[in-house]
Image (cartoon, helix red, strand yellow):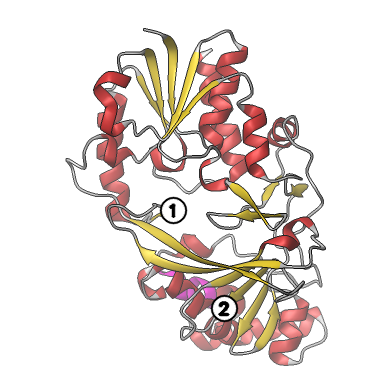
Amino acid sequence: MNYDYLIVGAGLYGAIFARELTDAGKKVLVIDKRDHVAGNIYTEDVEGINVHKYGAHIFHTNDKKAWEYVTRFAAFNRYTNSPVANYKGELYSLPFNMYTFNKMWGVVTPEEAAAKIEEQRQAAGITEPKNLEEQAISLVGTDIYEKLIKGYTQKQWGRPCTELPSFIIKRLPVRLTFDNNYFNALYQGIPMGGYTKMIENMLEGIEVKLGVDYLENREELSKIAGKIVYTGPIDAYFDYKLGTLEYRSVRFETEILDKPNFQGNAVVNYTDSETPYTRIIEHKFFEFGTQDKTVISREYSSEWKKGDEPYYPVNDDKNGKLYQEYKQLADNEGNVIFGGRLGEYKYYDMDAVVIRALEMVAKEI
């Protein structure tokens, strides 16, 4: 045993675990099958712009502990997430607010907007929402659902909204104000210099080996440490022996454009069903960039298959039951801690990853 802990995965969860264990005097090795640290929050410098290679990541939290932890390793800017929705060339404010309602219906006051939503809710006759479509209509009415939710959501999940659980959209921000801040969070921003630099700062002084696939080298790697922190897919760890958990994956088409400004905003969602991509990210605007060029990424959502990168767990009843069966197996793996989005088959915002990792590592220490 050369190490006290082997950390499988150099993303946010693994990096926090490694930092805290090292500071507690443990000897740690971090490995990752990719050729870089930072997992899905990896940013790479392209034309002087920090490109979010695996999709946009905006840190936001109301948890002071999470904020104070990440700001130990990076200074954050004041970026505020205010996406724009593009429906067949019509532009709407997100989150849904008075600008959205005015553009959609011509209403001017909050009372008029609330009355219009209530009128459409009553017309739909929904009392107990049974699926995402009914939940959305009960929150914002039929017009906004049809134009700004339905097509986008069905592209994102690859399923009709009538087959998706209502809880997916329960946290949808709806405001009878002109507030364009998508996240109702006390702390919000992007690390100046990119997320990769923040993770590198967390891993400073810790041994890291990249391009190492734990599952392909499990026998030898399991012998070098007393305990393992595994942040990969839980079903892959058990060689899918109970079946495969479902994920949504995302494919990116990234372009460098010889112009300073493509769309005027970091995030524009394409909410009609005909446009094949869900959104376009213009990376420079996450850090108020003034470069002469710009970099954009079109995002295409797809069903995950082996070999793809898993992004979002499909948290329906069927997958939930299968995960619980895998969790029972995981609980019997005495020297392995399963953590993070893939290890726990759970969609985590970044601040929740921070808090979860700190809680779990505190139990170890």
Q: Please say whether residue 254 is visible from this viewpoint.
A: yes
Q: Residues within 10 Å of mark 1 (few under 14, many from 20)?
A: some
| Residue toward you, 140 or 295 | 295
Residue that numbered label 1 is attached to: 311
The amino acid type found where label 1 is placed reads Tyr
> Which quarter of the rendering shows the C terminus?
top right
Left or right: 181 as drawn, with respect to 340: right
Instruction: Give the image location of residue 204, x and y in percent.
Output: 64, 23
Q: Let me know if residue 187 is in the magenta part.
A: no
Q: Quadrant of residue 314?
A: bottom left
Residue that extends furthest to the bottom in the rendered view of this protein: 106
What residue is drawn where x is 62% and y is 13%?
A: 23
Q: Let me know if residue 129 is in the magenta part.
A: yes
- Vertical placement of residue 227 versus 304, above or below: above
Closer to the N terminus: mark 2 or mark 1?
Answer: 2
Total tally of numbered discs in the picture: 2
The amino acid type found where label 2 is placed reads Tyr
Instruction: Give the image location of residue 22, x and y in percent.
Output: 58, 15
Instruction: Give the image location of residue 127, x and y in percent.
Output: 49, 74
Residue that numbered label 2 is attached to: 270
Q: Please say whether residue 129 is visible from this viewpoint.
A: no
Give the magenta part as a residue range: 127-137
What is the secondary structure assignment of the residue under circle 2? strand
> Which quarter of the rendering shows the N terminus?
top left
